[in-house]
Amino acid sequence: MNNTTKGVVIRHAIDWALAHGLNYRVPLTFSCSTQAIPEPIKYAATHAPFALTPAPFSKTCFQKARELQPIYNELFHSISKDKEFIDTAVKSLGNSDNFITNLYDIYQKVQKEGTAQNITLGIHRSDYMIHNKNNEQTLQQVEFNTIASSFSSLSYLTSELHRYLAKRQIYPESCNIDEKNIPFNDSFLSLANGIAKAHELYGVKNAIVLMIVQPMERNAFDQRWIEYNLFEKHGIKLIRKSLAEIEKEATLEGPDKKLMIDGQEISVAYFRAGYTPNDYPSDIEWQARLKIERSKAVKCPNIGYHLSGTKKIQQMLAIPGNLERFIKDQEKVNFIRSSFTGLYAFDQSEASKEALTRLTKNPDDFVMKPQREGGGNNIYGKDIPPFLAKLSDKEKEGYILMDLIRPEVQDSTIVRDGNAEDFKVISELGIYGIYLSNSEDKPVINEQGGYLLRTKSNKSNEGGVASGYGCLNSPYLQ
Ligand code: ADP
Ligand code: MG
Ligand code: MG
């Protein structure tokens, strides 16, 4: 694309994004707790960062990721119900992590008291990169998210943006982009459909859905689209509350522990907060989490699901025999296993010793992860050995080690805050998963729910979309 043509495409793309709600709130760079936010800034929005053109992506790997999803959904449902496995995972972290210990405390309290709701709703996102070695491409899982998986709305809008630019031939002919190779993205409606079906199973027509949100959420429009789709397609109302607000306003009513806010019964409590220690600045937020967990509302996710999504569980699943604990069909076991890369604990196992020897020689082949979500927590390559040297054996137990996946490096133009810049990039595919089971533990929904493609500069370790060099993209299947 020459610069004049590129300028035209960028202008079209930005206005399409702004007009369709592919947006973020503008960042608030001053302390909001001490200063009133000026009204125009509080309500200002900008387009979310996006890639100007879709990224070439292997069709075979894309299809494989979609086919894996229902099996992963079943697997994580089974894990979430396996107290012994969860206990082992938490114990092997050796009390090294307060955040996990607090979550586990809630888990144990509710297990002891007995759960007030047997319907479960999982809204997941399984993330992958394509490992590229000697021109052979293999799909490998980065992680499995069981809480607050974001971007289902904005990623749909990004694929529609790319399809529009292709269909209207705003991309020059030299780009050779045919909209048919950008797969339709189910993610716009799949989450709302899952929540609506869970609401229906709950069985109280006038009940409403609660979305638990962070007080200063920039990614609010991604969440608002779920709210609008829930109302427009299903006639269900959703309210947004922070954990602190819930502690103040919510009560548990009656022997069946209905979750009530302002006189309204909550059918589904959908978490878009609560996945990081930052969401619990005081004991008030922990009390709110416990209150929700004890209630009759359908939790998405419940605390068992939340704990199942830790990196520790992912690493444990890579230990021979553990997948078989949950999946009886050997073909499915092999299929799931084929998406794993090397995962190791810092323990005395042979696998771990062998990995540590390799780490000493080639640290750049590894990434080290704590039990955290939301990006920006990992340690990469050459930073690992000095980081490890500062940890006690006990502290090391809180982390996992993972082989670095190396996707093909591509060229991309990223549009952020109205500015376009060229980068060498790599991409990560996410597949949403929706799993709903009824009170008899029979699956009612088990589906893949569309995709997310995120692209980041190959110079940056993590691809945060809100900050840094990450952006939204869509796959160009080939
Ligand atoms: P989080 O739960 O914080 O999102 P992730 O495991 O997804 O944690 O790691 C954050 C980012 O780090 C990923 O989006 C990816 O860009 C990079 N990353 C994580 N694991 C790997 C890996 N094994 N190989 C290459 N990059 C990785
Ligand atoms: Mg995660
Ligand atoms: Mg991630």
Image (spheres, rainbow, N blue to C red):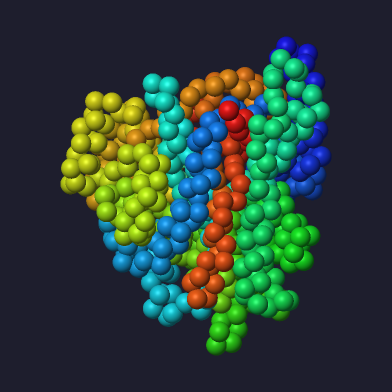
**Which residue lies most toward the bottom here?**
255
Question: Quadrant location of the C terminus?
Answer: top right
Question: Quadrant location of the N terminus?
Answer: top right
Q: Residue at x 39, y 24 (%)?
A: 133
Q: Is residue 96 above or below residue 287?
A: above
* Residue 471 in view: no
* Residue 78 in view: yes
Quarter of the image for residue 171 reads top right
Q: Is residue 52 above or below residue 73?
A: above
Rendered location of residue 12, percent (x, y): 80, 28
- Direction from residue 302 to residue 86 in the image, left or right: left
- Direction from residue 193 to residue 321 in the image, left or right: left
Q: Residue at x 70, y 75 (%)?
A: 207
Q: Residue at x 32, y 47 (%)?
A: 318
Foreground residue among 69 and 287: 69
- Direction from residue 264 to residue 294 in the image, left or right: left
Quarter of the image for residue 27 reads top right
Q: Residue at x 80, y 44 (%)?
A: 40
Rendered location of residue 349, percent (x, y): 19, 46
Rendered location of residue 378, percent (x, y): 41, 39
Rendered location of residue 347, percent (x, y): 22, 47
Foreground residue among 383 and 342: 342
